[in-house]
Structure formats: structure tokens, C-alpha cells
């Protein structure tokens, strides 16, 4: 178990550019989540997948945001035409839904995006 | 989704026991209570989860009264490395996590 990994850890981009982040979940975890966190706030849910199916999207996920999880393994989050308001830490988490237990999500270290 | 209310900040000296209480008056029958810890520039880390009564692991204890409208995270003998933000969350396995602002715990030497 190597944990959830995210790449890159830091990204600086100019307004209007597109960026793509990658998340590799813990192997065999069937759920994968994306969150966004700004300074002083708790993480905000963006979207999540169960295997390759995208089950829910937050209203925060505007049409400039798109996420994929091909083959139910790694996931990518793309932001098109970035705006300064997109500057935040983007966190990925994964979990295994099994039996009657409550959920427990394992978070990656995050990708810090700065839009200049 | 059940909303949670917890103190914005707390201070404690090293070696003391710290109790952080969270209110969740409209918790649903299927909801669990989960606590996460977050250090600066890191993703949150799961601490403990419970449904009712008391749960204890190697890191913390979670006390939940019978009405489940509140819960208390207890950290025994805190050290400087326990300085972090602690989040209380309520939800079921099919509900995405809803984080509030959490409680910023500062441990003082």
C-alpha cells in the first residue's frame, strides 16, 4: 500500500491556460474523489467516481472542469481556461466500499495550483 | 446533510488531554461520525470513526452520547506534533464528505 499519489505537487500557470492533474489511488480502492481547498477553509467536494463511473458532481464543478477515470484506476482532473479564482489545493482521495462499515477516505498530498 | 458545529480554535499544553466537541443536531440514522486531522500543506488524515457509544484506537477516543446529537474527540497526552486542524464530519457511505472549517488545535510547550 503506497498511498494515494498526485502529480504534479505544484503547478503555476497563466490565466487562460489549461491544466491537468493526475491522481493514482490506493490499488483496489473502487472510489475516487476530488476536492478543492482554499486557504483557511476545509476541503470542498468536487466529484467522485465509483470504478470508472462518475457518480456525482458538485455545482462547484463548472463546465471548465472535467474529470475522468478510465478503466477505474487513475483519474485526471482538467481545468480549461484557468482563472485566478481556480488557485487552490486540489486534493484526491480514495476509499474502498465494503460491507456495512462507514467510509474512510485516504487523501493524497494534493496539487497546489497557482494561476497568475 | 447533517451540519456540524465545532470550536474554531483551541489551545493546550503538551501532555494534557484535549477534548474537542462537535454538535450535529440533525444527524440521520444512517450517518456515521468521522474525524480527520490535517497538517499544513497535506491532505486530511482519517483519525477515528464511530456510530454510537465509545470507540477507541491507538490515536484517539470518540465519545458519542445516546442521542448522537454531539460527539467528543479525545486526544490523550497531546504533543507539539498534534498541532493541526481537526474536522468533524457526519454522513453515510454514499455521501461525499462535507468539511467545515474545523478546529485549529495549537499545542504549546
Image: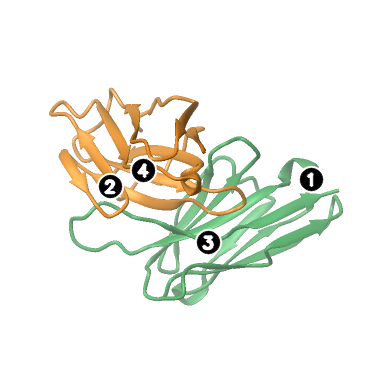
- Report the mark closest to the observer, 1 or 4: 4
Q: Are marks 2 and 4 on the same chain?
A: yes
Q: Are marks 1 and 4 on the same chain?
A: no
Which image quadrant for residue A12?
bottom right
Is mark 2 in CB contact (under 8 Å) with mark 3? Answer: no
Horizontal relation, residue A33 to residue B58: left or right: right
Horizontal relation, residue A97 to residue A113: left or right: left
Categorize mark 4 by other alpha carbons within 10 Å: few (<14), some (14-19), many (20+): many
SS label for mark 3: loop
Which residue is under mark 2?
A: B49
Is mark 2 in CB contact (under 8 Å) with mark 4? Answer: yes
Q: Position of residue B82 (x, y in %)?
A: 46, 45
Which residue is under mark 4?
A: B35
Categorize mark 1 by other alpha carbons within 10 Å: few (<14), some (14-19), many (20+): some
Q: Position of residue A8 (x, y in %)?
A: 68, 67
Which residue is under mark 3?
A: A108
Colour assigned to chain A in the rendering is green
* Chain where mark 2 sits: B
- Inter-mark Cα distance, 1 to 3: 24 Å
Amino acid at each position: 500500500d503506497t498511498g494515494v499519489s498526485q502529480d504534479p505537487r505544484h503547478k503555476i500557470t497563466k490565466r487562460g491556460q489549461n491544466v491537468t492533474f493526475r491522481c493514482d489511488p490506493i490499488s483496489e480502492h473502487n472510489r475516487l474523489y476530488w476536492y478543492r481547498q482554499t486557504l483557511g477553509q476545509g476541503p470542498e467536494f468536487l466529484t467522485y467516481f465509483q470504478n470508472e463511473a462518475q457518480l456525482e458532481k458538485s455545482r462547484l464543478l463548472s463546465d471548465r472542469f472535467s474529470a475522468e477515470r478510465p478503466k477505474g484506476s487513475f483519474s485526471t482532473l482538467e481545468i480549461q481556461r484557468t482563472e485566478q479564482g481556480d488557485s487552490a489545493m486540489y486534493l484526491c482521495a480514495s476509499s474502498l466500499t465494503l460491507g456495512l462499515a462507514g467510509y474512510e477516505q485516504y487523501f493524497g498530498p494534493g496539487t497546489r495550483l497557482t494561476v497568475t | 446533510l447533517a451540519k456540524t458545529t465545532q470550536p474554531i480554535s483551541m489551545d493546550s499544553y503538551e501532555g494534557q488531554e484535549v477534548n474537542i466537541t462537535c454538535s450535529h443536531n440533525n444527524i440521520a440514522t444512517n450517518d456515521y461520525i468521522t474525524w480527520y486531522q490535517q497538517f499544513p500543506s497535506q491532505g486530511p488524515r482519517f483519525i477515528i470513526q464511530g456510530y454510537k457509544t465509545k470507540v477507541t484506537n491507538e490515536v484517539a477516543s470518540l465519545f458519542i452520547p445516546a442521542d448522537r446529537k454531539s460527539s467528543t474527540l479525545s486526544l490523550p497526552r497531546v504533543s507539539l506534533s498534534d498541532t493541526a486542524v481537526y474536522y468533524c464530519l457526519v454522513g453515510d457511505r454514499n455521501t461525499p464528505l462535507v468539511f467545515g472549517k474545523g478546529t485549529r488545535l495549537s499545542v504549546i510547550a
